Amino acid sequence: MPKLQESDFYFGAVLATLFKKGEGVNLFLVQQETKSRVYKIMADHTNPDDFFIFAKYRTEHNGSGSWYFNFTENEQAIIREYLCNDGRLSLALVCGASAPSTSCLCILYEDEIRQIFDVGKMSITVSRKKYKRNFYIPIGGGKSIEIPYKRLY
């Protein structure tokens, strides 16, 4: 029997969340790409475009409401490959918490991923401000990207 790894639970949570809350769109997992953490998703006839999800997870740092995602050169190369090949890509950042029910999912779209990687960042810090529901990702120069909390894909 294969042993489960911690990442299996987090990536399973990404897929379960997408399929459970498709907002009127039926989603189908077409395949897990040969590259780890990349899933090809197909929507039903209402949205005929396939898209890809690159998933990564981190646990919360000391209850601070922030998560630090570091990307290896290989992971960045995989992401850039999908961005360059006109494959629709979303980055699913699983923001884990000590209580699973308070964990959340931060989804970045292609333009946001490009904004971050184009300034040469090898990491993403996702945070939530007190009394705010959205996520914030600093990109330098006092600027940050605001990501809606309930975004799915």
Image (tube, helix red, strand yellow):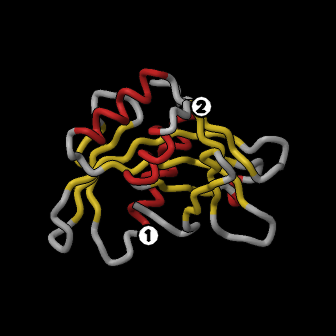
Q: Position of residue 33 (x, y in %)?
A: 28, 34
Closer to the observer: label 2 or label 1? Answer: 2
Residue 6 in sight in this render = no
User: Under tag 2, what secondary structure?
Assistant: strand
Q: Quadrant of residue 149?
A: bottom right
Q: Quadrant of residue 101?
A: bottom right
Taking 63 as reference, is 146 above or below it? Answer: below
Q: Amino acid at mark 2?
A: Asn
Residue under circle 1? Answer: 21
Outermost residue, front direction? 141
Instruction: Specify the quadrant that holds the C terminus.
Output: bottom left
Q: Position of residue 106 (x, y in %)?
A: 55, 55
Q: Quadrant of residue 109?
A: bottom left
Relative depth, front residue between 142 and 45: 142
Q: Categorize mark 2 by other alpha carbons within 10 Å: few (<14), some (14-19), many (20+).
A: some
122 to the left or right of 91: right
Mark 2 and mark 1: Cα distance apart in space: 28 Å
Instruction: Specify the quadrant that holds the N terminus.
Output: top left
Residue under circle 2? Answer: 70
Question: Residue placed at 60% from the left, 41% from the top?
Answer: 124
Taking 79 as reference, is 150 above or below it? Answer: below
150 to the left or right of 34: right
User: Under tag 1, what secondary structure?
Assistant: loop
Question: Residue placed at 46% from the left, 24% from the top?
Answer: 2
Q: Categorize mark 1 by other alpha carbons within 10 Å: few (<14), some (14-19), many (20+).
A: few
Question: Residue placed at 51% from the left, 43% from the top?
Answer: 116
Q: Amino acid at mark 1?
A: Lys
Q: Position of residue 115 (x, y in %)?
A: 47, 47
Mark closer to the chain start, 2 or 1 = 1
Residue 143 in sight in this render = yes
Question: Residue placed at 53% from the left, 29% from the top?
Answer: 71
